[in-house]
Amino acid sequence: MLVFDKVSQFNGHRCIFRHLSLTVDAPRVCITGPNGIGKTTLLLLAAGLISPREGEITYQKQNVLLTSSKKNIGISASKVALPAFMTVKELLKFHALQFNCPTNKWTSEFGLEPYLATKVSNLSLGNYKKLSLITALMHKPDLLLLDEPGNGLDEQTRAVLEKVLNSYPGQIIVASHETVFSDNTDVQHIALENIIDGAV
């Protein structure tokens, strides 16, 4: 269960959230809202990659800023830059060592094996997105955070992603303008603009 408790966050002088309180406990969650409203910021806060100006965010009753919490969280977002100087193979090996997990299954499923020797900086948009998704998925985190996961992917990879997400055992929170779950009846939809309007 992910909990935002009276969270306030700013981008410079612009207020993104003020005293936002939100409990997310459904296994599949889709966050929607217009561009610029704060969907990506919400995910970055949930992943513990940025600190809130005020308030606290917890996952399974532990602050997400703790190292122990971050091991249980995976994120793929455009604002989470992958190290450009590494090759795909080097990055995946580094990630695998950090989390003690295998890599070969994911590179095969997402069709990234031909690019293992390619530097991250030289990847196409689609392959960069695949790599970002793999690094989020490969340690099988209890909480998976995905920002527009279908962006830049071809139809075949989208089908692979949908299959992975529908069988994933952990909680998934997606910020997206499009449908990424085939079974929408079990997905909790959160319109972020309505939550923000209710926060004071």
Image (cartoon, rainbow, N blue to C red):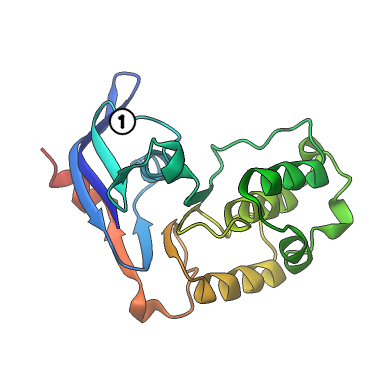
Report the quarter where the N terminus lies.
bottom left
User: Could you say where residue 156 lies in the image, as x and y percent from the top left?
Assistant: 71, 72
User: Could you say where residue 142 lies in the image, as x and y percent from the top left?
Assistant: 45, 59
Location of residue 98 with respect to 84 vertically, above or below = below
Which one is nearer the viewer's eye here, 26 or 157?
26
Residue at x-position 52% and y-position 71%? 168
Give the secondary structure at mark 1.
loop
Q: Residues within 10 Å of mark 1 (few under 14, many from 20)?
A: many
Which one is nearer the viewer's eye here, 118 or 66?
66
Name the image quarter holding residue 101.
bottom right
Residue at x-position 29% and y-position 19%? 13
Horizontal side of 89 relative to 66 (left or right) equals right
Horizontal side of 179 relative to 82 (left or right) equals left
User: Could you say where residue 199 lies in the image, as x and y percent from the top left?
Assistant: 14, 42
What residue would you read off at disc 1?
52
Which kind of residue does numbered mark 1 sit on? Pro
Horizontal side of 167 relative to 157 (left or right) equals left
Report the quarter where the C terminus lies.
top left
